[in-house]
Amino acid sequence: ASGVSAGHHHTCALLSTGNVDCYGLNNFCQAEDYMGGNAIAVSAGGYHTCVLLSTGNVHCYGNGESGRTMDYIGGNAIAVSAGASHTCVLLSTHNVDCYGNNWNGQDADYAGGNAVAVSAGPIDTCVLLNTGNVDCYGGNSYGEGNDYADGNAIAVSAGGFNTCALLNTGNVHCWGDTVFGGAVEYLGGHAIGVHAGETTTCSPLHPGHGHLYDTPATRPAPGFQSLRSAE
């Protein structure tokens, strides 16, 4: 496997063959495999899956309610993020095309021309800009939809009710709901990625710094540190 994405109740692995192997809950066919041989990235959402193809198109399948599984066929997609009920595609123009459920405004398009990454969360969307800032829109019940404007973000992940940005310092800054500790910051300086889930946040660390601080019932995979109770 050369990549992996975990949805609500299913997981998809990108294979070196250009195929995608999915498993888990399959009530909407969201865990079906993709066998086209031209996949270069995969994103597992709430109850749907989207595959970025080498053609610059995006193929989605699963629960198609509100149009979230609509294929993107513009030929200029460079990344895709499947949220709980909407999908966002980063284009080579550095704009973002989103579609699906829009009850909070989360599937609005971003047309600033300076997007370098996108993360579709359950009720919001966050776009990483080439300025090192993050522009978020959609649901904002706990502040998870606030923007980040310090100019040093290099990655972003929109979670359930929290959002986290990986900084060029190797730290992770999170904002939003703190009830479960999902918005706790990581200040160890060794983070190389970040993923915000429903109530927890995990970050892969440089080799030699992958200590775990979590309960066995929710412990992340080796090499990932839970920021929920990080020291």
Image: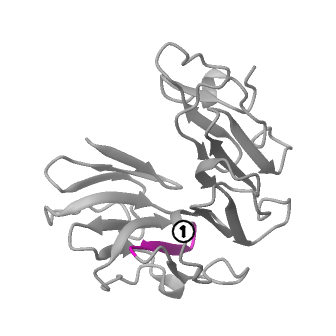
Quick one: label 1, few (<14), some, or many (20+) residues within 10 Å? many
Secondary structure mainly formed by the magenta segment: strand
Q: Measured from the top left, where is residue 55 in percent x and y?
A: 21, 73
Start-end of magenta stretch: 84-92
Q: Measured from the top left, where is residue 121 in percent x and y?
A: 62, 63
Toward the viewer: 89 or 198? 89
Give the colour scheme of this rendering: one colour
Q: Measured from the top left, where is residue 22 in percent x and y?
A: 31, 53
Indicate left or right for 75 with 139 as reference: left
Q: Is residue 157 magenta?
A: no
Q: Name the residue under label 1.
A: 115
Q: Is residue 91 magenta?
A: yes
Indicate left or right for 149 with 29 as reference: right
**Up/down of 183 relative to 143, above or below:** above
Number of numbered labels in the structure image: 1
* Residue at the image point whose x is 76% and y is 58% from the top: 149
Give the amino acid at mark 1.
Ala
The N terminus appears in which quarter of the rendering? top left
Q: Can residue 190 be seen in this view?
A: yes
What residue occupies the far top of the structure in this picture?
208
Indicate left or right for 130 with 33 as reference: right
Indicate left or right for 179 with 149 as reference: right
**Up/down of 213 relative to 96, above or below:** above
Q: Measured from the top left, where is residue 4 in percent x and y?
A: 37, 46
**Up/down of 195 relative to 82, above or below:** above
* Residue at the image point whose x is 60% and y is 36% from the top: 202
Toward the viewer: 168 or 55? 168
* Residue at the image point whose x is 64% and y is 41% from the top: 167
Q: Is residue 46 visible?
A: no
